[in-house]
Image (cartoon, rainbow, N blue to C red):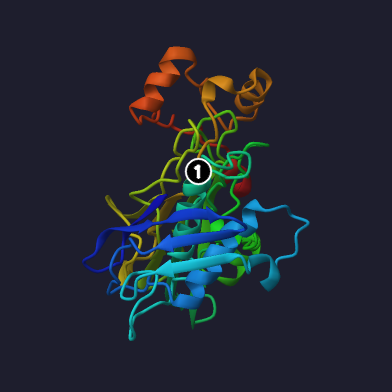
């Protein structure tokens, strides 16, 4: 199986994680020797983190009643090449490794195991993409730092159901939540103009991917601020599995006056002016199984709830789309009356 990271924030692009899983009697060997060389950026994975990512991948797949302890994972051995992104030589930056490339190691393993245990593997999840903003709060005249935990992405589908909507990145399994919008607006110079589901963002499938989010966040500062980003998943979307379609990738932008620019996944010192707007469209999860096998009642419910705005292609048309790797373009979401009702 293979997973690919967008970049390291410096000069490395398309950073691959390749894994082979081999069953030998009662033992499992996980071979990570064919991975990208270590990089300048902070996505290298320390050896303990790599071992943890391998165990995490299996923990998602085994019977949930099985204890997650040393005895359970004793039959698993891991091979890697020193000097690679999954076993870097010191000194190497590893700050982001518990997110990336931990999730990418796990997803490469899930792909590798899909053929042998399709009833247990899962499609791709959204990846982390955070924004941190530093400035001065005009209400208190004091400096502030605020981290974006809102606008979570979708989870991947599996053989028993759709991916969870807006669940967040895969390595956390939904364990990282965002706080109250009202509290954030009270404590920080921020206004959430829009915070909604992102229709059509989940990959189609027998069980579709969970949808991501759409956020419009306006700065209510009086002086310039700065922002940093840290994450993944703009170039490579959450993967579909066993005939399912990929989800939509992240799309983050900053609107300043009449200009608009995309945000890269790893930037520092981004100028943020009073009144600027962050537009966050987080990724949807990958679909599981062919869309033509999806239950008609589930399709009708998706359309009724607005998480899907068009019926998926069926029959030969769906098969051709999957073979060509195409994803239908997202329909433009219908803007809700949230901002208007809040002003009222």
Q: Position of residue 265 (x, y in %)?
A: 35, 61
Residue closest to the far bottom: 91
Compare residues 146 and 70 and report the one nearer the observer: 70
Compare residues 155 and 198 and report the one nearer the observer: 155
* Secondary structure state at the residue bearing disc 1: loop
Residue closest to the far right: 65
Q: How many marks?
A: 1
Residue at screen point 28% across, 71% down:
39
Q: Quadrant of residue 36?
A: bottom left
Observer able to see residue 214:
no
Residue closest to the far top: 316
Q: Position of residue 141 (x, y in %)?
A: 49, 82
Relative to 132, is 72 on the left or the right?
right
Residue at screen point 55% across, 39% down:
209
Relative to 213, is 31 on the left or the right?
left
> Does residue 30 sit above or below 63 in this rendering?
below
Observer able to see residue 326:
yes
Residue at screen point 64% across, 63% down:
179
Compare residues 79 and 95 and report the one nearer the observer: 79
Q: Quadrant of residue 133?
A: bottom left
Q: Quadrant of the C terminus?
A: top right
Residue closest to the far left: 11
Compare residues 166 and 270 and report the one nearer the observer: 166
Relative to 138, is 208 on the left or the right?
right
> Does residue 194 sit above or below 56 in this rendering?
above
> What is the crowding at mark 1: few (fewer than 14 residues within 10 Å), some, or many (at least 20)?
many
Q: Position of residue 207 (x, y in %)?
A: 60, 32
List the residue tagged with mark 1. Answer: 284
């Amino acid at each position: 199986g293979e997973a690919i990271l967008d970049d390291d924030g410096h000069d490395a692009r398309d950073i691959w994680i390749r894994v082979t899983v081999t069953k030998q009697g009662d033992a499992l060997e996980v071979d990570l020797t064919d991975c990208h060389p270590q990089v300048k950026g902070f996505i290298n994975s320390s050896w303990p983190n790599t071992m943890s990512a391998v165990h995490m991948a299996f923990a998602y797949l085994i019977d949930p009643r099985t204890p997650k302890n040393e005895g359970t994972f004793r039959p698993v051995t891991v091979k890697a090449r020193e000097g690679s992104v999954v076993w870097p030589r010191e000194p190497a930056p590893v700050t982001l490794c518990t997110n990336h490339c931990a999730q990418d190691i796990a997803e490469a393993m899930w792909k590798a195991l899909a053929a042998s245990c399709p009833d247990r593997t899962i499609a791709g999840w959204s990846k982390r993409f955070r924004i941190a903003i530093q400035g001065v709060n005009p209400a208190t005249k004091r400096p502030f730092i605020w981290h974006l935990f809102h606008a979570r992405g979708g989870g991947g589908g599996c053989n028993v159901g759709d991916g969870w909507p807006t669940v967040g990145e895969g390595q956390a399994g939904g364990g990282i939540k965002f706080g109250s919008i009202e509290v954030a607006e009270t404590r920080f110079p921020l206004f959430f103009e829009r915070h909604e589901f992102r229709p059509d963002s989940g990959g189609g499938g027998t069980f579709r991917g969970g949808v991501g989010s759409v956020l419009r966040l306006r700065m209510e500062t009086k002086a310039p601020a700065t922002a940093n980003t840290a994450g993944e998943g703009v170039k490579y979307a959450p993967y579909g599995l066993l005939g399912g379609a990929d989800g939509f990738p992240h799309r983050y932008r900053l609107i300043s006056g009449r200009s608009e620019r995309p945000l890269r996944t790893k930037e520092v010192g981004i100028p943020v002016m009073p009144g600027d707007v962050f537009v966050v469209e987080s990724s949807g999860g990958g679909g599981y199984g062919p869309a033509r096998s999806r239950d008609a009642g589930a399709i009708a419910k998706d359309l009724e709830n607005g998480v899907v705005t068009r019926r998926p292609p069926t029959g030969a048309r769906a098969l051709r789309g999957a073979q060509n790797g195409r994803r239908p373009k997202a329909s433009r979401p219908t803007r809700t009356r949230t901002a208007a009702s809040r002003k009222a």
